[in-house]
């Protein structure tokens, strides 16, 4: 025993350790390299985004400030002087608030998306995240639930407040709609409207006539026979005018409000996903945000203003046009300066180009969401750290 110890002390050969078997892969390494984001990655990113107070204030103001401000002022004025100021909610106010919320919500969602898509590059943290072994795809995918968890509840709260004020503090539902001094009952089908007009042909012709042309005198009105012929020939046009006026006069029913709420969520969600992909592609927050604003308030209205010869299908590739043609009919009254829309896919577009098929609308919207997500993820995977 003493000889062995001495040999070791003077540098003799020591016994080699036993060969180690294959080490099992570290669980932490597996989690970091997985392409699906972990819950910790999502919550950490969510906390980082909430700390950007300037951006969060802008997002809240763009989405929720308008309905709170407009409806709050109307509620106060009506409570103080109900004889002078009418009810706080009305179909027109509801449509204007929701349409504006969709417009501003798209811009706010795009700004949040571009911020999440570029924050690691602008803060200089992308290299450190990659060095730790985290999957780049997981880094991109973690941003999607973060942005949607901020935007969707905010839109839901703002829309719920608008719907409650319209339903419980709004004007009562009218029993009729007025056309040139003629009151026509609401909720008529096209056949019922035709029967009602044919029973009162002179009133029907007066209700939907556009008025005398330039230079024409007062002259006698049409005879009952002429009025019936005109009604039968133009009942489709008359019914479209009747539906448009009825929509602007009535508070939307519950099922219509559900459609409007889902459409608002879709509008905001698309804006966020496109902004996220564009921000990841360019890596510059300001440029990406400006491009998204230009798309929403310049490019889409120009492409939707009129049909361009031989380029109609190209116009329809704009996601804003596809979203517009899915606009629920209850929002047609707040379309602003746009022309009256057409009922499409249960909705009513307010732009002026011919409607696209339902499958094409769905394909354009899904294509923009998936396409920009793939582009953004690909750019993050291939970007130099």
Image (cartoon, rainbow, N blue to C red):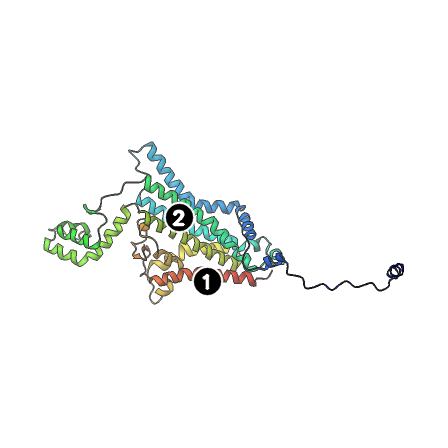
Quarter of the picture containing the C terminus is bottom right
Q: Position of residue 1 (x, y in %)?
A: 87, 59
- Looking at the picture, does residue 16 appear above or below residue 69? below
User: How many angstroms separate mark 1 from mark 2 (CA)?
Assistant: 25 Å
Residue name at image x 58 percent, y 52 percent: 123
Q: Earlier in the sequence, mark 1 or mark 2?
A: 2
Name the residue carrying label 1: 371
> Foreground residue, 253 or 241?
253
Residue 359 located left or right of residue 283: left
Numbered label tally:
2
> Foreground residue, 17 or 250?
17
Q: Is residue 66 visible?
A: yes
Mark 2 lies on a secondary structure that is helix
> Foreground residue, 157 or 184?
157
Specify few, some or many for label 2: CA neighbours under 10 Å numbering under 14, 14-19, or 20 or more.
many
Which label is found at residue 101? 2
Residue furthest to the front: 1
Q: Position of residue 87 (x, y in %)?
A: 31, 38
Residue name at image x 67 percent, y 62 percent: 23
Residue furthest to the bottom: 310
Specify few, some or many for label 1: CA neighbours under 10 Å numbering under 14, 14-19, or 20 or more.
some
């Amino acid at each position: 025993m003493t000889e062995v110890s001495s040999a070791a002390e003077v540098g003799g050969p020591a016994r080699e350790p036993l060969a180690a078997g294959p080490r099992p892969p570290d669980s932490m390494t597996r989690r970091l390299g997985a392409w699906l984001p972990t819950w910790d990655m999502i919550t950490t990113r969510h906390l980082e985004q909430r700390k950007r107070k300037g951006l969060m204030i802008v997002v809240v103001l763009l989405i929720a400030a308008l309905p709170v401000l407009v409806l709050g002022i109307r509620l106060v004025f009506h409570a103080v002087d109900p004889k002078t100021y009418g009810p706080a909610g009305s179909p027109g106010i509801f449509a204007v608030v929701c349409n504006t919320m969709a417009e501003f919500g798209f811009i706010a969602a795009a700004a949040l998306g571009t911020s999440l898509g570029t924050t690691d590059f602008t803060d200089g943290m992308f290299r450190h995240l990659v060095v730790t072994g985290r999957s780049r795809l997981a880094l991109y995918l973690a941003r999607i639930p973060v942005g949607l968890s901020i935007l969707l509840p905010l839109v839901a709260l703002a829309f719920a407040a608008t719907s409650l004020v319209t339903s419980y503090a709004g004007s009562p539902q009218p029993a009729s709609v007025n056309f040139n001094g003629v009151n026509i009952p609401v909720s008529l089908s096209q056949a019922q409207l035709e029967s009602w007009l044919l029973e009162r042909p002179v009133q029907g012709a007066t209700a939907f006539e556009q008025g005398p042309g330039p230079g024409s005198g007062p002259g006698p009105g049409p005879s009952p026979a002429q009025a019936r012929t005109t009604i039968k020939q133009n009942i489709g046009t008359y019914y479209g005018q009747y539906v448009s006026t009825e929509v602007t006069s009535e508070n939307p029913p519950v099922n219509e409000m559900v459609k409007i709420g889902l459409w608002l969520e879709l509008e905001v969600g698309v804006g966020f996903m496109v902004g996220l992909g564009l921000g990841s592609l360019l890596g510059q927050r300001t440029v990406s945000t400006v491009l998204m604003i230009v798309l929403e308030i310049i490019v889409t209205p120009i492409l939707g203003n009129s049909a361009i010869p031989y380029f109609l299908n190209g116009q329809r590739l704009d996601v804003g046009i596809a979203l517009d043609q899915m606009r629920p009919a209850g929002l047609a009254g707040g379309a602003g300066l746009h022309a009256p829309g057409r009922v499409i896919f249960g909705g009513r577009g307010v732009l002026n180009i011919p409607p696209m098929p339902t499958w094409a609308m769905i394909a354009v919207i899904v294509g923009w969401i998936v396409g920009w997500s793939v582009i953004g993820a690909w750019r993050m995977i291939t970007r130099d750290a």
